[in-house]
Image (cartoon, rainbow, N blue to C red):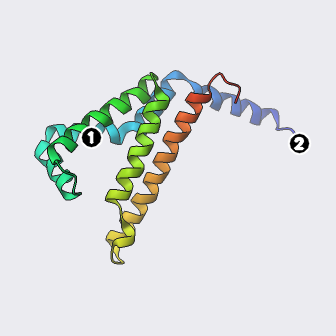
Amino acid sequence: MTEPSSTLRLRGHLADIVAAPATKTLVLLALCSAYIQGPLTKIFDFPGAIAEMNHFGLQPAVAFAVVVILFELTASALVVSGFLRWAGALALAGFTLLATFIALRFWEMAPGMDRMMATNAFFEHLGLAGAFIIVAAIDLTKGTGK
């Protein structure tokens, strides 16, 4: 069964919007927004960044804070700029999974609102990691016919 011409025209218009360079840049910025905002917050409140590393048992806290800041900003720049986008996306996917299993251990929490919020955040982060893997897959297969 073929689609009606009005549906085809709508799909064509939507494809033009979604595929536009400005849209792609905005979407990649949105995808990386937590990895841009987080390090900037850590830079402007470095004692808070150290406290966060201590809270999660990451020692030495100062070194972990600096590495996380540099990592998140660098990987985000790769994703948004397109230079080694696949590497930045896979790095952020791995980082997100690691951080999720460190910070959102909902299964260890008592039932209640905190557990429910941690559970939701856990699965949202899994989705975010999946989105980064899709970005990497698209970048890696571009021009390969796959």
Distance of label 2 from label 1 (alpha carbons)? 52 Å
Seen from the viewer's position, the closer of residues 53 and 1 is: 53
Side (left or right) of 20 relative to 124: right
Q: Could you say which quadrant of the image residue 63 lies in?
A: top left
Seen from the viewer's position, the closer of residues 23 and 5 is: 23
Callout count? 2
Q: Say what secondary structure mark 2 lies in.
A: loop
Residue 117: image x %, image y %? 37, 65
Measuring 33% from the left and 57% from the top, which residue is drawn there?
A: 102
Q: Which residue is mark 1?
A: 68
In the rendered image of this protein, does residue 128 appear above or below residue 114? above
The quadrant of the rendering that contains the C terminus is top right
Q: Could you say which quadrant of the image residue 73 lies in?
A: top left
Q: Which residue is mark 2?
A: 1
Side (left or right) of 4 relative to 145: right
Q: Say what secondary structure mark 1 lies in.
A: helix
